[in-house]
Structures are given as C-alpha cells and as structure tokens.
Amino acid sequence: MKKTLLLSLLTAGMGFSALAQEVIDAEAVKKIREEGLNHSQVMKTAFYLTDVAGPRLSGSPGLKKAQNWAANELKSYGLVNAKLEPWGKFGKGWQVNKNYAAITVPYYHAIIAIPKAWTSSTKGAIKGDVTLLKVDTVTDLQKYKGQLAGKIVIIDNNAPALVRSKNPDLSRYTDEELAKMAAATPQPAGGARGGQRGGGNPQMATFMAARAKAAAMRGAISAFFQQENVALILSQGRGTDGTVFTTNGASYADTAKAALPELETSGEDFLRIVRLLRAGQKVSMEADVQTQFYNDDLQGYNVVAEIAGTDKKLKDQVVMLGGHFDSWHAGTGATDNAAGSAVMMEAMRILKTIGFKPKRTIRIALWSSEEQGLFGSRGYVAAHFGKKDSLKAEQAKVSAYYNLDNGTGKIRGVYQQGNAGVGPIFQSWLEPFKDLGATTVTIGNTGGTDHQSFDAVNIPGFQFIQDGMDYNTRTHHSNQDTYDRLVEDDLKQAATIVASFVYHTSQRAEMLPRKEAPKAGTN
Amino acid sequence: MKKTLLLSLLTAGMGFSALAQEVIDAEAVKKIREEGLNHSQVMKTAFYLTDVAGPRLSGSPGLKKAQNWAANELKSYGLVNAKLEPWGKFGKGWQVNKNYAAITVPYYHAIIAIPKAWTSSTKGAIKGDVTLLKVDTVTDLQKYKGQLAGKIVIIDNNAPALVRSKNPDLSRYTDEELAKMAAATPQPAGGARGGQRGGGNPQMATFMAARAKAAAMRGAISAFFQQENVALILSQGRGTDGTVFTTNGASYADTAKAALPELETSGEDFLRIVRLLRAGQKVSMEADVQTQFYNDDLQGYNVVAEIAGTDKKLKDQVVMLGGHFDSWHAGTGATDNAAGSAVMMEAMRILKTIGFKPKRTIRIALWSSEEQGLFGSRGYVAAHFGKKDSLKAEQAKVSAYYNLDNGTGKIRGVYQQGNAGVGPIFQSWLEPFKDLGATTVTIGNTGGTDHQSFDAVNIPGFQFIQDGMDYNTRTHHSNQDTYDRLVEDDLKQAATIVASFVYHTSQRAEMLPRKEAPKAGTN
C-alpha cells in the first residue's frame, strides 16, 4: 500500500481492546501539513475577522459585515454554495456609537467601562453626582424614592478588595493533565448537556433559587430606576488591570422594553468610586454613552459553504466543521471565536488548495448567536436534521461535526463526547500530529458550544481539546479579546489537524460510528 | 536588664566576625508590634493619598492638596514643625481635565490611552484620519510635508506582536534569592550611583549614543509636527491587558515651549490601529484631550515633621525617615509611592501613639519630584547638609535616613548600601521580626530613589528590601497603580519594622557607623 500507512491501535489508555486498523493517507497528510504550516493564511483571515470587522455581536451590523466578508472569502477559495443562511428569528441588533465616562470630583479621571449589551443611551452628554445604594431587598428601594433623578447610581455589592491571581495568565496542558484526560472512563448516562449543567445536584437547586431571587430583584430595581429617572447605572465588571469582562444588560428581543444605560466598570475604577462613597466623599461624573438598536432585520444567519463530494455513492453524505462567528462587543472576539472561525475557514482553504476532491461533501458552518444559547447551530440542526424525537432523513447522512471554540490554544487532542467507537479512529488520526503536541483522546465530554447541538440529535459532534492559554484569565468575553492574543503557530497547527480530520472523515469507508452502537463493548 | 534583650551577632552570612552586641528594647518592640499590627491606620492613610487625593504629579494641584493633607495629618498625630518646606524651583504644574479618544472608522471603539505628562490639549473635540508615518531619519519627514494638518499621527515603531509574560504578575522573594542577597560581597568602589548607572560599561556608550540620536530626532519630529499642524500624536504605551505605563512627553520647565497633545496608547489599541493602517485600511478617530498648566507657583516642596528629641546631649542629632510623595498621573501612585509615604507616616504615628520620647530627634520627610530626578531629597540635602565637597555642620548630626519606595511588598530585610559597619546592627534589629519574614541584611546597594541623595553626602541612607509583588509587571508608573494593589498586611508589617528601626536608631548609644570607618575590617 503505497500511499497509506497502517497503524495498529493497541494504544495505551484506550478503554477496550479492539484490533481495528485505521487508514491514514500519509501523502495527503504531508500536503496538508505543508500548506497548513508553511503557507498559512490563518492570521490574515483572523485579522479581517477582528481588526477589520470589529465586534461581531449577534444581530449587529458588524456581524453582518463580517459574515458577508467570510462568505465571499470562502467563495474565493473555490467553495460552492457559500451563503448566509437564516436560522430563525434572533431579535434586535445593537452597537456602541460612543462610550465615554469619567469622574470629575474629587479630581478628573477617565474610567475604563463598557456599556452592557442591549442597554440604551444616556440623554446626551450628562453630568451628575454618584449615589451609592444599599439594596438588600426590594423594599429597601423605597428609601431612595424621589432622590435619584439625574443621578449616576451604584448598588453597593459589598465587594471586598479585588482578588488578584497568583498564577500566570497563560497556561498550557501539562503531560499529567493530558494523561488524566486520556484515562477518563465513560460518564454516566444523561449525555453531554445533562452532565455539564449538573442536573440533580442538590446544591444546584439552592443556587438556582438564589439566582432566581436576584433576577426577580433585578427586574424590580430596573423598573424603580426607570421610574425615578436615573441617568446611568454603574456595575462592577469582572477582571483586573484594565481587563473588563462583559455581558448583556438587557434583552435583545424585539418586544423588550428599553433598559437604562449601564456601564460594566473595571474593578479598579468601580471600587475606587465605591470606597470614596462609603467614606462619605462626594463623587461626580460626566458620561456620554450612545448605543444604537437595529430592527430592520430580526433574522439570525449562519455562514455556510461546501466542497462538493465526488463519490457517486458517498457524495450525499456530509462531513461538517465549524465554530461560532458571533462575539461579545467589548473586544473583537479574537479568541471567542474568530480563532475557531479562522481555523475552520483555513482548514477549508487548505483542502481546496491541495486540490482535494472528497468522496463525501464537506460543509463549513459559522454559527451566530452561540453566545445567547447556541441559537445558530440549534436552528440549523432543527431545520436540516430535525429534533431528537422527530429526526429528518438528513440526520442519518452526517458522518461528523467538528467544532473549535476554546480560544487560541493549539489542539492537544479531542473529546469523544461519550462516543466510545470513535476512540481508536481519532487515536490513529492524531498519530501524524504527535510532533505538534496533539496526542490525547478522551472519552470525556465538554460543553458550552455548538457541537452540543449535533450531539443532541445523535450526530457525532466533537470539540477539540485546546490549550487554555489566557482564555479564562483575560479574553473570554472581555475587552481584551483582541487580535494580540492569537498565537500564530497554534492556529496553524489547529487548521492543519482539523483539515486532516475532515479529510479522513470524508474518505473513510464507513461513516463515523454513532453513540448507541458501540455501547455493549465498553466497560 | 529588665527591658532589653542582648543578642549575639555571630549570625551566619555576615562578612566579618565582630563580636558586637546590639541592644534591643524588647518592651518597645512589643508595643510597636501591638500598635502597628493590631491598631494600624496605614490603609486609611493610603486611602487618602490615593483615592481621595488622586494623582500627585510634581507641581500639580493634586500634589499640593495631598501635601497639605499629610502635613495636617502628621500634626494630628502630635508631631511638631510639620510644614511644606520648599526645596527649590521645579517648574510648571499640569493636570488632565479631559481624556477621551476613540476610533470611529472602520467601526467605533473607545481606546485606552493616557495623555503624556506636560503635553498640551487638542483644539477642542477633534475628528480626523490617522496617518502612519515611516520615519527612520529626519529627512524622511519631508515626504509628509503639507499632508499632516489636522491628522492624528503615528510613527510606525516597527512593533512586533505584543509580548505577554508567561510568569505570574505577583512575586515575592524566595528563600534562595534572599540567601543570595545575604551572601553578597561588597561592591567595587564607585558607590551606589556609579554601580547603578553602569559608568565605564562599553555597551553603555553605544546605548547612550543611540538614545541621544533618538532624542535629537524627537526634537526635529516634534518641530515638524507643530509646523504641519498635526492634531494629535499616538505612541505605544508599555503594558498589556489594559495596563498602560506612562511617562512625560514634554518638559515641565517654565521656559519650555508647549508640546503637541500626545496619547500613550495601550499596546492592544495602538497595534490594532497600526495593523489596520499597514494593511491599507482607513482609520478615523475622534478625541478630546484637555490638559491644564499651572505657573502660579514654580517652587517644589517636601513635607517635613518631627518628634523632638529629649536627651540633652543627643536631641540635636537626627534620625530621618521618608519616601517620595509625588507620583505619575495615570493612576493614583499607590505603590509608587503612597505605599512608602503611608508606611512612613504610620511609623511616626506608631511611635507617637506608644508615647515614645526619643533621645534623638526623629524627622519624617516626604519628598516631591523624585520621579524627575530625586529633586526634593537632593534639594533638601543640599540645603541642610551641603554637597560632597562642601559639607555643612548638620551633615555630621544625622545618624541615618531610612527610605521606602519599592512598592507594596513587605520588608524582607535591608540594603547596607555598601556600609559594612551597619551589618551586625541591622541584623540584630531585624531579629524580633523574623516571624514576619524580615531576615536579610545585604552589603549590596540599591538605587533609583531618595536614600541616594543622603548616600551621596555620606550620610547613612538605606532602602529596605521589599517583595516585588506586581511593581514591575503592573503598577510602576502605570494607570493600574491604584489602591487595589496595596496589600494591607504588608504595609502594616513594614510600618512596624520601620518604627522599630527608627526607635533603635534614636536610642542607640552611638550614631550609626558611616562608610569610611569600617572599611579596613571588611574583606
């Protein structure tokens, strides 16, 4: 066998003793590596998705601009059927048009603060005193009746001093951590999402109750502030050193009432103001926060494009790859998830550039509204593959969906997502990339992103294991999620490995095994 | 001896075998520890110096306000002769009254950027395109003649991607590092400043020449930009993740010409703009930077106050302690050097509170314009103690000057600053604080702050060894040098130890030995 390499799969750490052999196309791997590692375009793609496009919040004009760019770019690679495909109704678009805030008393200091997504504007450039409120119950609000008009308000969150990490921001998996993942045993039934969300955990009920209470109070507080004509709300953003993690502060539903302007304020600036107010010092501010809503198109879209299959019997079968394309608004969503989007686009470019004519059709999908609840991928899956209890015929034709959405870190392996049958296959497919640090196959699940939409309808959906880097410490939903965090060598490595996985999935004699089948054989 | 403890000083790691014994007043140490560790006011003091006072740039109204507060606070402790004492001419005061800048094309994004100290204002709120200049030599400027009016300009600094640290931000000395410091041998003649500044190093000449060339070009660039009516300059600030280290961008001399407005821009925001411009993308900005100069009082001041000596023979002798009180403008100078200032004020408060009547006079001095060249302490030393070759009589009456200016980290020991004779004395004085982590006496020098002004006229001047914490990684001259970085337990520990050192210096039979005397005995 000239062009292929047979790998024995008696690999240590696998939970069964199959003697399966998996075909690796060594010549294709060589070409993929050459194109992916030595002629990469991934950083150019990432540059357009971040620096040029800017934030890609769901429904925003920025997202639409980036989606159009990506569809055209995929066309330019020679892909077919490149388009923006609607997945259903999302809601209002929103973007920031001006963001300025400073304290002016006891001295001037411009603060680092980000408007919460889908909150509204200040009434032009405003000036006002800052009032610290103690609100433990809804009735506490009445103390402030008639006192808050035109004020900038802070609810005292009893925040202690900032806690700063003693660990480095950047991290990669150690050999020990990877070995532990490789040695993991299958997780109990309930599947990925049950496991992730902790259903049945008695502490969870308490937590959910507390959260519900806080949410109920938030509604009452919000209504009171509106009624009292509060000018601006400051809340504390997570993060230190100028890094601010952001969220939404209001609903994106087209029927939702406008919420007051609210700034998620850097820990340092927030606590400085709180300390001054607690000590009885007067604090005044000026601010000009202008946001804009878009109601012209409430639809959500995914970007999809294909390399058509060429094998008469297999071309109706599909291998999918993707990642979410939408981001939060404070940075440019570089690690979350321009990284994954650029890697998946680059994998397609690599396969096209090496002249690959796949047996099965290869389809890339760049989802939107992942950040609001995996809406883009869920909508796509429902439309094409149906629901768990009412599957469509196409569901049977998808061999696998590969996802990338854990930041800029290189691929260290892949989660089987509880699918025992793919273990030996993935182990052999990783073999040619051991020198690039990708070695680990774990039976374990990972959650929180779009492969779950596929897993939910029993289409094999996988997320790769990626080095953490500074995803949790600095970039995930923060104002620091910018191009600077992207690690070129890691993205090249990831695109190369994904391209090879997709290649082999499209050429494999059989589709990938699904979860039910191999259950009997596992421990 | 009821109230004292005799300590043998055959301590390991000292460079000689003196059999000296040093008196420790255990009863006083107990009281100092009780007041310093259990009734501390140091965080309250630090709060006023940072959050309430704001930035304390040399010559600024903020500095004057904080100096007046400190003088009054020291009076309230019961100190005498508390005053602002002029040390000579400084120059113009300056402060920021408004600081806003954002990119508006290709999309809106408010940037994190700090006006360089002593630069001027934009002409109101401005809008303009950003131009990237390639300027390797002064003649390169001519390419841009007639093209820069109203532009926001960036000189391409050929900056590569941001380099992010793999180490934690926070650090403390390890036992090994301290042991190495303790084992250090005396440094060659030339003294602290010669050693610090690297006189005679052949590489230094090259470095200084390159720096001189760059400085010469800066002058020409600045003149060209003014002539061309540039609206605003952006330069790259050191730092990552929203942290921006700041400097001055113009002279504070009252005769200096106004410099154009210039923003030291966060690495992420600067590089985003540079990448866009390098790729041929249009970038537009809006900005409103308003700074204000003060010429009403060009004088510089130190804050001084005393606990008068009570011993007839010794009260004319003086023990001094201090640290610089001025800061940079982007943060509130918490670790540089509200920390040292608050600790020294607290040490005085502790000594007053325990009812201490010192033999020698104790004098605190909080310097200004340290950041511009140790001007406050140099001016004070020149006025009171003379110059190296023309010493005044008072020079002979200062037993020691203790300085604190290396951030919020606790005291781990003390630098002898090349003074072998104080080694055994300091070793014994640290003995009661071993449990607090202060153990190390090193013959070594440290530079860069105000004890050098004393050392320069052969008055024993010392800086304590302090844990580094995040001084170099986050706070030193940055926008993140705020109250949040102050570590309460560390400041309490430092104030307690300084109070004890000052106590024992004031009560010791002899003044501390000076450098000349013990030279013969050292290796």
Image (cartoon, coloured by chain):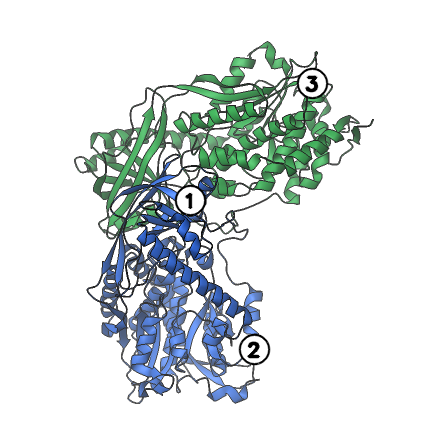
Chain colours: A blue, B green
Cα separation between marks 2 and 3: 74 Å
Instruction: Look at mark 2 in the image and give the residue it sits on.
Output: A185
Quadrant holding the N terminus of chain A? bottom left
Q: Secondary structure at mark 3?
A: loop
In this image, B345 relative to A226: left or right? right
**x, y (%) of residue B44?**
54, 36
Pointer 2 with pointer 3, Cβ within 8 A: no
The circle drawn on residue B359 is: 3
Cα separation between marks 1 and 2: 46 Å
Q: Residue furthest left?
A: B146
Residue at the spot 44% in from the left edge and 16% down from the top edge: B88
Q: Tell me the kind of residue under disc 2.
A: Thr
Q: Secondary structure at mark 1?
A: helix
How many other residues sit within 10 Å of disc 1, few (<14), some (14-19) or many (≥20)? many
Cα separation between marks 3 and 1: 46 Å
Which chain is home to disc 3? B
